[in-house]
Amino acid sequence: MEVKIGDVLDNVLNFYGPAIRPGKVIVEKRYDSKDVIRGFPSEITQVFSNLVENALEALTPGGILQLHVLASRDWRNPTRCGVRVYIADNGPGISGEDRRRIFEPFFTTKGEKGTGLGLWVAKGIVASSSSE
Ligand SMILES: Nc1ncnc2c1ncn2[C@@H]1O[C@H](COP(=O)(O)OP(=O)(O)OP(=O)(O)O)[C@@H](O)[C@H]1O
Ligand SMILES: [Mg+2]
């Protein structure tokens, strides 16, 4: 199935609407690519929703959430064209030590508030779709 990334991101932003009302977090959207990607809309939505959720949890009021979609190439194999999606926030970031573990199931720094499954699930979806 072909999915427009911009549509998926807008749906995710609508879903988290109350958390990103003006004055809370500033959203900067830049959808330069109209390209579609192949996949299941529900899975792709799950991936980006987990990333946006993490960004919103990391940001304090007035922080910036950036969503950028652009046509790009695989850096390791430049003949392979595709769509690159940046989901970025200007929160505290992730320490080098944590960065090694963020894709592990149940790794969380949020105590009772996190299950630590978000990125693990996202990685699994991306890995299974890219082998198709
Ligand atoms: N945007 C971000 N800024 C800072 N830290 C992040 C960000 N995204 C992920 N992390 C770190 O990675 C960890 C794992 O993220 P993940 O989404 O897998 O789990 P979680 O957010 O803790 O819990 P869950 O997603 O299951 O509610 C987080 O606990 C946090 O330490
Ligand atoms: Mg999460």
Image: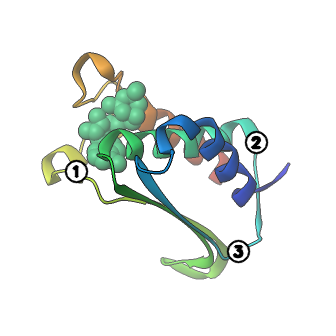
Q: Which image quadrant for residue 12?
A: top right
Query: Mark 1 is on which residue type?
Result: Ile
Q: Is residue 132 shown to the viewer in this render?
A: no
10 Å neighbourhood of mark 3: few (<14), some, or many (≥20)? some
Q: Which residue is mark 3?
A: 33
Q: What residue did someone put label 1 on? A: 94
Camera-side residue: 128 or 33?
33
Residue at mark 2 to residue at mark 1: CA–CA distance: 29 Å
Question: Looking at mark 1, is its residue's CB closer than 8 Å to ligand 1?
Answer: yes
Label 2 within 8 A of ligand 1 by Cβ: no
Q: Amino acid at mark 3?
A: Ser
Residue at the extreme top: 112
SS at mark 3 in the image: loop
What residue does disc 2 label? 41
**Which residue occupies the extreme front position in the image?**
23
Sequence-first disc among 3 and 2: 3
- Side (left or right) of 56 relative to 95: right
Number of other residues with Cα within 10 Å of mark 1, as a class: few under 14, some 14 to 19, many 20 or more: few
Disc 3: residue Cβ within 8 A of ligand 1's nearest atom: no
Please name the amino acid that badge 2 sits on.
Pro
